[in-house]
Image (tube, rainbow, N blue to C red):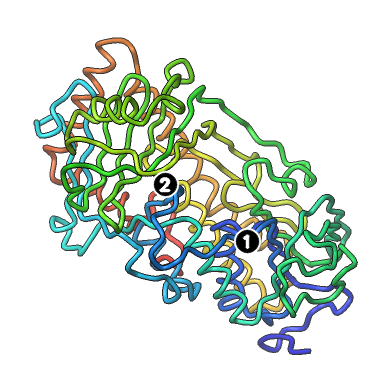
């Protein structure tokens, strides 16, 4: 068996690395690892609970979308996923407009970013989550990585490896129909020198490593839907901060917009279930009529909002990335970008260890990854929580301060440029950007 770039491996384990969870962060981490970690592709397995269904060419946009920063675009290119995306289904956005509910969207109190002011073609892309996930999985498989579908139900760590027990989705060891199901197919068990937990906010990998996580309930729901508007979205991401929570309109490739409406649980009813015309009317009022008459173009779905912060990102032979390590408020749309930065930083840490002849599960290398990413993610979490509290404060002085803060940033070229660069993902923020993101 090919041992990669001349580095030995323990043939007593089925794999060098098992990535648990094939959401965007996990699938991207797997695609990066097969290309950049110096480990033979067949020694890396991606365990998927379920696989995303590929969209038909003319299908309407999916309900779940993400705003990709420039750093995320670079990471996806490094993962071999960008080349597999149907570019006609991405929507580049050139501008962002943010304003407080008590301000005029065109007034001095509104904050406006324009890619042209930064000498950039755009500020990023709005892309369907499932499309990105699928591109990463395809890239991983085409590079020779092993894909298996099934639900992991227990993990046991010893000095040399982690042993995983899982239930295959179709009971035969290769629920994906993947011919390269790998060692132990059908047994519902495998071993790996390192397990990457990318299995979401309720991570089993985190729980079974006895890593505690602090959770904060925002007592809000995010209502997501696709809408059509009488006026063009102008390739602009619009966000209005209301007392009941922020409302974002994100531009989509077919001229429609994806909405993320964060609402205090006390104010949600009857929006998820009321007649479409009534919902559209309420939505138009909430965004201040900036895009004209609104027509609902999809189902409505509600997601509970909470923040999650793992006390540690690593344990012996385990590392957490994405939502398994951190979940933040979606008001700035940074959750997916942070998960992709985790994937890039972890890949670099593992690649560095392997190049030195070290075990990919060595805690020393994993600690380097944690040090790079945990502070940045905690600062982002604190910033989003602070913004959410400040902009939704009931007291007039707090609302006035929030409005003044936006106006101040808008009037300062230096502050505005720094904020725009942070949103673009061309600044590392607190800590250097991973090399694969630069």
For the residue carrying disc 1, how many other residues have a C-alpha within 10 Å: few (<14), some (14-19), or many (20+)? some
Residue 136 coordinates in the image, percent (x, y): 53, 68
Element on which disc 1 rests: loop
Q: Identify the mark at residue 51; answer none if there is no mark.
A: 1
Residue at x 68% of width, y 54% of height: 197
Q: Earlier in the sequence, mark 2 or mark 1?
A: 1
For the residue carrying disc 2, how many other residues have a C-alpha within 10 Å: few (<14), some (14-19), or many (20+)? many
Where does label 2 land, which residue?
A: 334
Task: Check the picture and name the quadrant holding the N terminus.
Answer: bottom right
Question: In terms of depth relative to the viewer, which is nearer, 343 or 186?
Answer: 186
Location of residue 161 (image quadrant): bottom right
Residue at x 83% of width, y 53% of height: 155
Element on which disc 2 rests: loop
Question: In terms of depth relative to the viewer, which is nearer, 346 or 35?
Answer: 35
Report the number of discs: 2
Residue at x 77% of width, y 59% of height: 169
Location of residue 34 (image quadrant): bottom right
Relative horizontal placement of residue 409, taking residue 172 as reference (left or right): left
Residue at x 30% of width, y 58% of height: 253
Residue 22 coordinates in the image, percent (x, y): 62, 60
25 relative to 327, above or below? below
Residue 342 coordinates in the image, percent (x, y): 54, 56
Location of residue 108 (image quadrant): top left
Question: In terms of depth relative to the viewer, which is nearer, 420 or 333?
Answer: 333
Q: CA distance from mark 2 to mark 1?
A: 23 Å
Question: In terms of depth relative to the viewer, which is nearer, 435 or 206?
Answer: 206
Residue 246 coordinates in the image, percent (x, y): 34, 30
Relative horizontal placement of residue 38, taking residue 245 as reference (left or right): right
């Amino acid at each position: 068996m090919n041992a990669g770039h001349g580095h030995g491996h323990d043939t007593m384990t089925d794999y060098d690395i098992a990535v648990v969870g094939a959401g965007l962060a996990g699938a991207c981490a797997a695609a990066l690892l097969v290309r950049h970690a110096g480990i033979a592709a067949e020694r890396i397995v991606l365990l998927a609970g379920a696989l995303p269904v590929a969209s038909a060419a003319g299908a309407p946009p999916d309900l779940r979308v993400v705003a990709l920063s420039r750093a995320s675009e670079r990471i996806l290119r490094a993962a071999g996923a960008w080349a597999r995306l149907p570019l006609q289904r991405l929507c580049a956005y050139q501008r962002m407009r943010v304003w407080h509910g008590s301000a005029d969207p065109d007034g001095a109190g509104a904050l406006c970013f324009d890619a042209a002011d930064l000498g950039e073609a755009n500020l990023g892309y709005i892309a369907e989550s499932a499309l990105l996930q699928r591109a990463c999985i395809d890239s991983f498989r085409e590079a020779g990585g092993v894909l298996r579908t099934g639900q992991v139900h227990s993990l046991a760590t010893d000095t040399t490896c982690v042993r995983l027990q899982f239930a295959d989705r179709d009971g035969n060891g290769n629920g994906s129909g993947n011919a390269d199901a790998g060692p132990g197919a059908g047994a519902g068990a495998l071993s790996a020198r390192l397990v990457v937990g990318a299995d979401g906010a309720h991570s089993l990998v985190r729980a079974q490593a006895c890593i505690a996580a602090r959770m904060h309930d925002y007592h809000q729901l995010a209502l997501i839907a696709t809408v059509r508007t009488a006026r063009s979205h102008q390739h602009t991401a619009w966000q209005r901060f209301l007392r009941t929570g922020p409302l974002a309109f994100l531009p989509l490739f077919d001229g429609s917009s994806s909405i993320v409406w964060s609402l205090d649980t006390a104010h949600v009813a009857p929006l998820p279930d009321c007649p479409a015309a009534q919902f559209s009317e309420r939505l138009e009022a909430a965004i201040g009529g900036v895009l004209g008459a609104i027509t609902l173009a999809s189902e409505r779905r509600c997601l509970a909002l909470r923040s999650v912060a793992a006390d540690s990102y690593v344990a012996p032979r385990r590392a957490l990335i994405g939502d398994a390590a951190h979940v933040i408020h979606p008001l700035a749309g940074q959750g997916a970008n942070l998960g992709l930065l985790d994937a890039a930083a972890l890949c670099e840490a593992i690649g560095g260890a392997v190049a030195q002849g070290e075990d990919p599960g060595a805690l020393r290398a994993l600690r380097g990854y944690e040090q790079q990413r945990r502070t940045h993610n905690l600062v982002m979490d604190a910033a989003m929580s602070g913004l959410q509290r400040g902009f939704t404060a009931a007291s007039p002085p707090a609302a006035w301060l929030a409005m003044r803060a936006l106006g101040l940033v808008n009037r300062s070229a230096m502050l505005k440029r720094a904020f725009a660069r942070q949103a673009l993902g061309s600044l590392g923020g607190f800590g250097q950007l991973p090399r694969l993101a630069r």
